[in-house]
């Protein structure tokens, strides 16, 4: 069983809303849930993993989605573009659409899951687009979202950085980002830590075994200020490089002069040694001549 499927089974007690009859595991259950003053109709798999063994985890309204939907049920999204990542049944996306969003896009990596999301939207007469969006590829939707919704999207250490990159990819400057995760899952703590460095946390609360946080992406002014600061740092770095280049040039000239002096000194010393050797040889020759004459 995959890691995700194992994690989904851990939550099966909070996700299942239908019959416990084993023969009904693969059937869909239609229920109506109230979020704020909204009644939302859902059609979901009775269990995350049916008798056939098929993975139905994307066709279940998990606890995190319910907590997130409840949180945004009282919001007003008039004129906003809302994108839900890893939408599953897309209940939060439907709530956003019912709350006046101008455009709502429910994204997931699975076409089958997106069909269920479209069905949820249809049941609620909500204008929700569905779109395949792979966090590994990040194609499209760049900086299109005024609001980003994520429910139960962190289920492993590897998913955390991918989700953060996806959020940063689609969020406009100043966007609101709503994230709800189940406490204690692998990768969740690391995800919260990385998000604290990337965005401003404006709200955090616990709902049972779930944590919901709201972030604000950096505004255009803040991004421009950071860009100006980076440019200033780059200018300082360039000035340092120019200064270093001048220092190296001066050092090279000094080293060249020192080398010439050293070579001159060595040449003089070598010449002196040669002269002394010549004089010594001349003296030896003279002594030999005198000895020969005396003999």
Image (cartoon, rainbow, N blue to C red):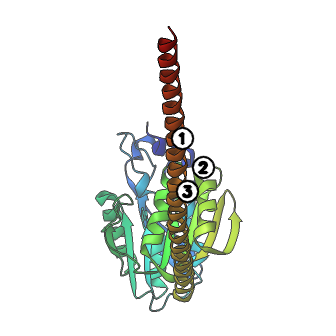
User: Looking at this rendering, what residue extends furthest in the front direction?
Assistant: 294
List x then y, in percent, for residue 174.
Answer: 54, 84
- Label 3 vs 1, first from the N-terminus: 3
Q: CA distance from mark 2 to mark 1?
A: 84 Å
Residue located beneath label 1 in the image: 272
Residue 83: quadrant of the picture: bottom left
The answer for how far apart the CA atoms under marks 3 and 1 are is 21 Å
In front of the other: 148 or 70: 148
Residue at mark 3: 258
Task: Name the residue carrying label 2.
Answer: 185
- Residue at left offset 57%, top offset 51%: 187
Using the image as rendered, state which of residue 196 and residue 3 is in the foreground. Answer: 196
Residue 139 visible in the picture: yes
Q: Nearer the viewer, mark 2 or mark 3?
A: 3
Q: Residue furthest top?
A: 295
Circle 1 SS class: helix
In the image: residue 67, left or right of residue 111 = right
Q: Mark 1, residues whose alpha carbon is within 10 Å: few (<14), some, or many (≥20)?
A: few
For the N terminus, which image quadrant? top left
- Between disc 2 and disc 3, whose residue precedes? 2
Where residue 279 appears, as percent x and y from the top left, is 52, 32
**Distance (Cα) linking label 2 and label 3:** 67 Å
The secondary structure type at the circle numbered 2 is loop
Q: Are marks 3 and 1 in contact (CB under 8 Å)?
A: no
Secondary structure, mark 3, is helix
Q: Residue at x 40, y 77 (%)?
A: 124
Q: Nearer the viewer, mark 3 or mark 1?
A: 1
Q: Residue at x 55, y 56 (%)?
A: 258
Residue 267 or residue 288, whichever sits in front? 288
């Amino acid at each position: 069983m995959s890691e995700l499927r194992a994690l989904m089974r851990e939550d099966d007690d909070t996700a299942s809303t239908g019959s416990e009859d084993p023969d009904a595991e693969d059937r869909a259950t239609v229920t109506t849930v109230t979020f704020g003053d909204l009644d939302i109709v859902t059609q979901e798999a009775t269990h995350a993993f049916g008798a056939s063994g098929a993975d139905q985890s994307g066709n279940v309204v998990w606890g995190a989605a319910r907590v997130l939907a409840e949180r945004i049920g009282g919001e007003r999204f008039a004129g906003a573009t809302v994108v839900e990542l890893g939408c599953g049944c897309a209940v939060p996306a439907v709530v956003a659409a019912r709350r006046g969003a101008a455009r709502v896009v429910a994204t997931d990596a699975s076409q089958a899951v997106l069909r269920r999301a479209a069905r949820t939207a249809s049941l609620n007469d909500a204008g929700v687009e569905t779109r395949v969006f792979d966090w590994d590829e990040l194609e499209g939707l760049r900086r299109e979202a005024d609001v980003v919704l994520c429910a139960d999207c962190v289920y492993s250490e590897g998913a955390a950085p991918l989700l953060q990159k996806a959020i940063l990819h689609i969020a406009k400057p100043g966007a609101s980002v709503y994230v709800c995760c189940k406490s204690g899952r692998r990768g969740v703590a690391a995800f919260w830590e990385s998000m604290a460095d990337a965005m401003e946390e404006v709200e955090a609360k616990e709902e049972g075994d779930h944590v919901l946080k709201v972030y604000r992406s950096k505004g255009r002014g803040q991004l421009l200020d950071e860009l100006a600061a980076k440019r200033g740092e780059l200018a300082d770095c360039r000035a340092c490089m120019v200064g270093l280049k001048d220092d190296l040039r001066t050092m090279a000239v000094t080293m060249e002069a020192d080398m010439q002096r050293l070579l001159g000194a060595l040449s003089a010393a070598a010449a002196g040694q040669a002269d002394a050797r010549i004089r010594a040889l001349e003296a030896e020759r003279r002594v030999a001549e005198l000895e020969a004459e005396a003999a």
